[in-house]
Image (cartoon, rainbow, N blue to C red):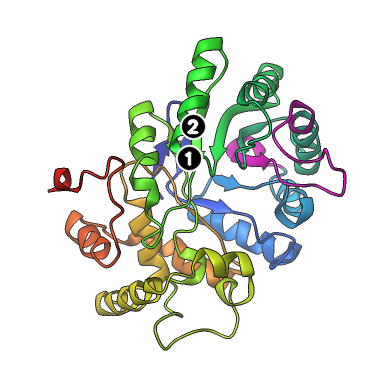
C-alpha cells in the first residue's frame, strides 16, 4: 500500500479509502468488522462514513471498530441528509450542522473528525452561513479539515472564495463521483482541484456494479443496485453504458484481471485523485478492490481503457482545442 498527501493538509492517507456505506445495512456488525480488519491488514488507514449511512448505524459500528487505533486512522463523515422526521434535522443550516456533528462524534466515540464533508449543496441556505458554522467546528477542534461532496466546480470555487475573503478554513478535500462511465469530473472539478491543491477522494469507481463484469448488452444480474434501486437505475440508465461495460469486461478478461480491480485502478490513476473510495458488502467482494493496487496502470493502458467510453466535451465546448 502506498500513501499520499491529502491535498495541503499534511495528512498521509492510503492510496485507497474504504467507504462504510454498507455498515449496518448490507453488512451486519460482524461482517463489517471482518472487512475493517481486512482493510487494516492491507495497510488502509482511511475510512469514509456519513451520518445518513444506515441511519447512523454505520458510524456506530465504525466507532466500535476504531477503538484502540483511532489516532492511526483518518476518519471522515458527512452531514446534510435527513436524520429522522424533524424538519430541521437536515440541510446546510448552522443549526443542523452543529447538531449533526455532535451526534456523529457521539456515535463514532471520538472527539474529532479528521474531515467533515458537506454531503450536498443546499440551495436554500446562504453558503456564508454554512461556511461560518464549519469555521466554528474547526475552531472548536471538533473538525480538523473541511470537505465538499457532490458539489459542482463553481460551488466549490465560490466556497473557496468566501473562505479566503473572511479568513475562514477552506474546503481542503472534495468527493466527486468518478468512473469510466461517469467522467464529468474531468471537465472542471479535477482541474479546479489540481489548481487549488485540493485532496480528491472520488467514489463509485465501479459505477454501482456496471463495471464489475456482471453487465452487458445481454448480461444482467438478478440482484444489484442498478437492478433493484430506482436511484441507481436512473443514474445509470443511458443505453451506451452497457456497451462500455461489455467492452471493459472483455478487456479485463484479455488482460487476465478482475474488472473491479481494473476499474478502481483506472479511477485512482487520474492525477487529480488522491484515493478512490471503494466499498463492499462482504470480505469476498472486498478482495478485487484491494487487488487494484497491484495493477501497473501505464499511460498506454489508461488511454486504452479511456477510449472505451465517451470523453466529456471541454467546459467551453471549443472541441477543436482538444486536438
Q: Can residue 63 be seen at all in this image of the molecule? A: yes
Which sits in the foreground, 40 or 321?
A: 321
Q: Residue at x 81, y 32 (%)?
A: 99
Can you identify the residue that label 2 sits on? Answer: 156
**Kind of element beneath mark 1:** loop
Residue 67 on the magenta span: no
Q: Is residue 308 left or right of residue 275?
A: left
Q: Say which residue label 1 marks.
A: 152
> Are the residues flagged by discs 1 and 2 in contact, CB closer than 8 Å?
yes
Label 1 crowd (10 A; few <14 / some 14-19 / many >=20): some
Is 68 displayed left or right of 237 in the figure? right
Instruction: Check if residue 75 falls in the magenta segment.
Output: yes
Label 2 SS: helix
Q: Is residue 69 visible?
A: no
Q: Label 1 vs label 2: CA separation?
A: 6 Å
Name the outermost residue toward the right.
86
Q: Residue at x 39, y 71 (%)?
A: 241
Magenta-highlighted residues: 68-97
Residue drawn at 75 percent across, 34 percent down: 101
Amino acid at each position: 500500500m502506498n500513501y499520499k498527501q491529502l491535498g495541503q493538509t499534511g495528512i498521509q492517507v492510503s492510496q485507497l479509502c474504504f467507504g462504510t456505506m454498507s455498515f449496518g445495512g448490507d453488512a451486519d456488525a460482524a461482517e463489517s468488522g471482518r472487512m475493517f480488519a481486512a482493510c487494516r491488514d492491507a495497510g488502509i488507514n482511511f475510512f469514509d462514513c456519513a451520518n445518513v449511512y444506515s441511519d447512523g448505524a454505520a458510524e456506530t459500528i465504525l466507532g466500535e471498530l476504531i477503538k484502540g487505533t483511532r489516532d492511526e486512522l483518518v476518519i471522515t463523515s458527512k452531514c446534510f441528509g435527513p436524520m429522522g422526521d424533524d424538519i430541521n434535522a437536515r440541510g446546510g443550516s448552522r443549526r443542523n450542522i452543529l447538531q449533526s456533528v455532535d451526534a456523529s462524534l457521539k456515535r463514532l466515540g471520538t472527539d474529532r473528525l479528521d474531515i467533515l464533508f458537506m454531503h450536498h449543496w443546499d440551495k436554500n441556505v446562504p453558503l456564508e452561513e454554512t461556511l461560518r458554522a464549519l469555521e466554528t467546528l474547526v475552531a472548536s477542534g471538533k473538525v480538523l479539515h473541511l470537505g465538499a461532496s457532490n458539489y459542482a466546480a463553481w460551488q466549490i470555487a465560490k466556497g473557496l472564495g468566501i473562505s479566503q475573503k473572511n479568513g475562514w478554513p477552506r474546503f481542503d478535500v472534495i468527493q466527486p463521483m468518478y468512473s469510466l462511465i461517469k467522467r464529468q469530473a474531468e471537465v472542471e472539478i479535477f482541474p479546479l482541484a489540481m489548481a487549488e491543491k485540493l485532496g480528491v477522494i472520488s467514489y463509485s469507481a465501479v459505477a454501482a456494479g456496471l463495471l464489475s463484469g456482471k453487465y452487458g448488452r445481454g448480461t444482467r444480474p438478478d440482484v444489484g443496485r442498478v437492478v433493484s434501486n430506482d436511484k441507481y437505475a436512473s443514474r445509470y440508465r443511458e443505453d451506451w453504458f452497457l456497451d462500455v461495460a461489455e467492452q471493459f469486461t472483455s478487456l479485463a478478461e484479455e488482460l487476465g484481471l478482475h474488472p473491479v480491480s481494473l476499474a478502481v485502478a483506472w479511477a485512482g490513476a487520474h492525477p487529480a485523485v488522491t484515493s478512490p473510495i471503494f466499498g463492499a458488502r462482504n470480505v469476498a467482494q472486498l478482495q478485487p478492490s484491494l487487488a487494484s493496487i497491484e495493477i501497473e496502470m501505464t499511460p498506454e493502458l489508461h488511454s486504452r481503457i479511456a477510449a472505451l467510453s465517451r470523453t466529456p466535451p471541454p467546459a467551453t465546448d471549443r472541441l477543436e482545442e482538444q486536438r
